């Protein structure tokens, strides 16, 4: 399951005026929708969301939302930004069930002695089995590199990205004399 967690305020008032007011208070308005449920209007902390967006591709990733003590697994479907200022305007989440099959973006994390060629890969599997990130260690590299097909994936998770893509290489550390 995802290690990414956002706290949400539920029951925000809808409309452009109230959305502007929320943004001025440091919140980003959003919506949570899913099969067999009415959409829920919510707001998340802009600082938390900006930190999440700055470090990884969030659209297409699994993010858990804390709705006042109740945690829900969601898929980030869309993030809207201001066309000039690029600040976050709105976010849409899709509710996921634990056994639902999804294809999502998962971040790669470089261990010591490893340089990443790509920052993420696409994985398919059930919501509960897909990890939030995959760490690549120097021991996994073969002849100084690792292809996507060489990633260690949890049981029931398959690679949806190009299996021949080189995802990591050995970092070259030059010793100063």
Image (cartoon, rainbow, N blue to C red):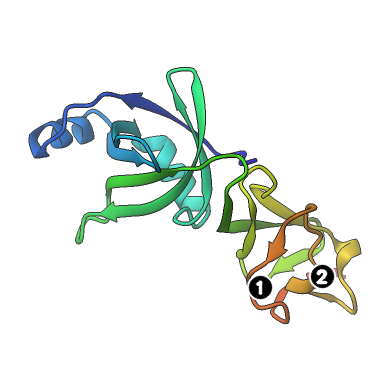
Q: Which mark is residue 117?
A: 1
Taking 47 as reference, is 130 left or right?
Answer: right
Which secondary structure, mark 1?
loop
Name the residue at 62% across, 44% down.
Answer: 99
Residue 76, image x, y percentages: 43, 49
In-image side of 4 versus 137 (left or right): left
**Where does residue 121 sit, x and y in percent of width and height?**
62, 65
The residue at the point 26 percent across, 24 percent down is 11
Inter-mark Cα distance, 1 to 2: 14 Å
- Of residues 155 and 69, the one nearer the viewer is 155
10 Å neighbourhood of mark 1: few (<14), some, or many (≥20)?
A: some
Decide if residue 169 is in sight here.
Answer: no
Label 2: which secondary element: helix
* Residue 24 vertical placement versus 129 (above, below): above
- Name the quarter where the N terminus is drawn: top right
Residue 38 horizontal side relative to residue 101, left or right: left
Q: Position of residue 69 (x, y in %)?
A: 49, 17
Residue beneath disc 2: 150
């Amino acid at each position: 399951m995802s290690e990414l967690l956002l706290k949400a305020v539920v029951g925000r008032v809808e409309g452009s005026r109230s959305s502007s007011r929320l943004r001025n208070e440091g919140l980003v308005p959003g919506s949570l929708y899913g099969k067999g449920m009415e959409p829920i209007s919510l707001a998340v902390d802009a600082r938390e969301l900006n930190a999440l967006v700055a470090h990884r591709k969030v659209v297409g990733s699994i993010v858990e939302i804390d709705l006042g003590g109740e945690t829900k697994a969601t898929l980030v479907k869309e993030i809207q930004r201001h066309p000039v200022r690029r600040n976050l305007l709105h976010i849409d989440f899709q509710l996921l069930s634990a056994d639902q099959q999804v294809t999502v973006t998962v971040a790669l994390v470089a261990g010591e002695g490893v340089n990443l060629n790509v920052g993420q890969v696409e994985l398919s599997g059930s919501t509960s089995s897909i990890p939030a990130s995959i760490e690549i260690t120097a021991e996994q590299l073969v002849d100084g590199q690792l292809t996507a097909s060489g990633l260690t994936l949890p049981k029931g998770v398959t690679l949806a990205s190009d299996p021949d893509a080189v995802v990591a290489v050995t970092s070259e550390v030059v010793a100063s004399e």
